[in-house]
Image: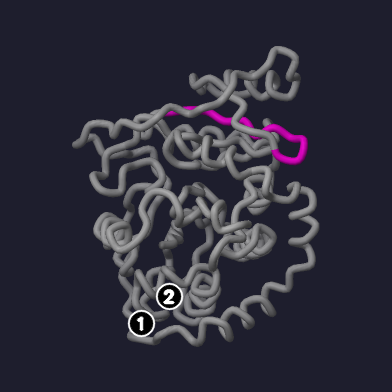
Amino acid sequence: MESDKNWGLAAVGLTGTLGVIALLAALGAMIFGVGYFSCSSETRTDAPARVSEPVEAQPVPADDMVGMGLASVLERAGLEARLLVFFERGGERIYGVDVHGAEAIEAWELLRAYTDESGFYPVILGEGAAVRLHRQVIDGFEAPSVILESALIVDVDAWREARVQQYGAPPRGAYEFVSPQQVHVAATTDVLTGAPFEHVAIALVPTRSPWEVPAYLGYGGWNECPPPEVHVALMKRWYQRHGAEIVSATQDTVEMQVARPPIDQPAALELATEHYVYCSDIVYQGTGDLDALAAGLEGAPMWLFFRD
């Protein structure tokens, strides 16, 4: 991707020193190994919703049989939000819903429960403006099918070693395990106030495989962010090893729900190395060293990646 299209994890929203300070202040407990996000229907109620623009998307056309079928599934599931067409990728439509931030996690869980039936996997894109931003850059990416084919030949171990050589060995420190705590999913709230967004976009991607989501979103390939095919290959590996599933992919962060986190120090350090080469900011602007990152991964039910 060209530099003027680098909206992704860093170029829109919280950027620069102020953005890092705000993000660390709001998420500090998690980032420094005290706790990790847990997918839960609970949300803060001590602050009014933060005004955000509605999702810019079209209703599903009456002649769209796939969309109408998906809308029928969502209706049976009891989701009241109206199904919309967010954008198209490689000849396939990415659908989605516009929900209140206080209801977004419950909506995500419901949509995830119906993925096998619907054939669509949900991912939270953040506040309503995220859909418009995706639409502005989506034509610059290869088709999802091309990205998925490229992901099949990615040698994750070789890529990891190359990134270690590129970045250098991460700083080391003390491994001090702290039991993870449940906190809120960042993608649904204002990082400065903790208030839920008035509008949150949840995309419905035409796959049952969580690791394929970056291919359909064209996610990555700017600055130090890995290209989409590496996202796919890494997330498939993490799904197979840890049951990790993507929950959100916003302008600044990626969050993943984890069924089988590492349960001892060696496994946590091995995983932490992969997280470091995937997103080095979580060390250099977060935990400070690899051991603190690893200690936070041990037993953690949610992973957060952020880029400045």
Structural distance between the alpha carbons of marks 2 and 1: 7 Å
Q: Residue 56, relative to residue 204: is it above or below?
A: above
Contact, CB < 8 Å: mark 2 with mark 1?
yes
Q: Which residue is mark 1?
A: 175
Q: Residue 50, relative to residue 299: is it above or below?
A: above
For badge 2, the amino acid type reads: Ala
Callout 1: few (<14), some (14-19), or many (20+) C-alpha neighbours within 10 Å? some
The label number, if any, that marks residue 294 in the structure image: 2
Q: At 70% from the left edge and 42% from the top edge, which residue is drawn?
A: 207
Q: Nearer the viewer, residue 200 or 208?
A: 200
Residue 178: horizontal and vertical position, in percent? 31, 70
On screen, residue 50 versus residue 57, left or right, reads left
For badge 1, the amino acid type reads: Tyr
Q: At 30% from the left edge and 48% from the top edge, which residue is drawn?
A: 191
Residue 267: horizontal and vertical position, in percent? 52, 77
Q: Is residue 199 magenta?
A: no
Report if residue 76 is visible in the image.
no
Q: Which residues are magenta?
A: 89-99
Report if residue 93 is visible in the image.
yes
Q: Nearer the viewer, residue 244 or 100?
A: 100
On screen, residue 105 versus residue 30, left or right, reads right
Tell me the element at label 1.
loop
Tell me the element at label 2.
helix
Q: At 66% from the left edge and 36% from the top edge, which residue is drawn?
A: 120
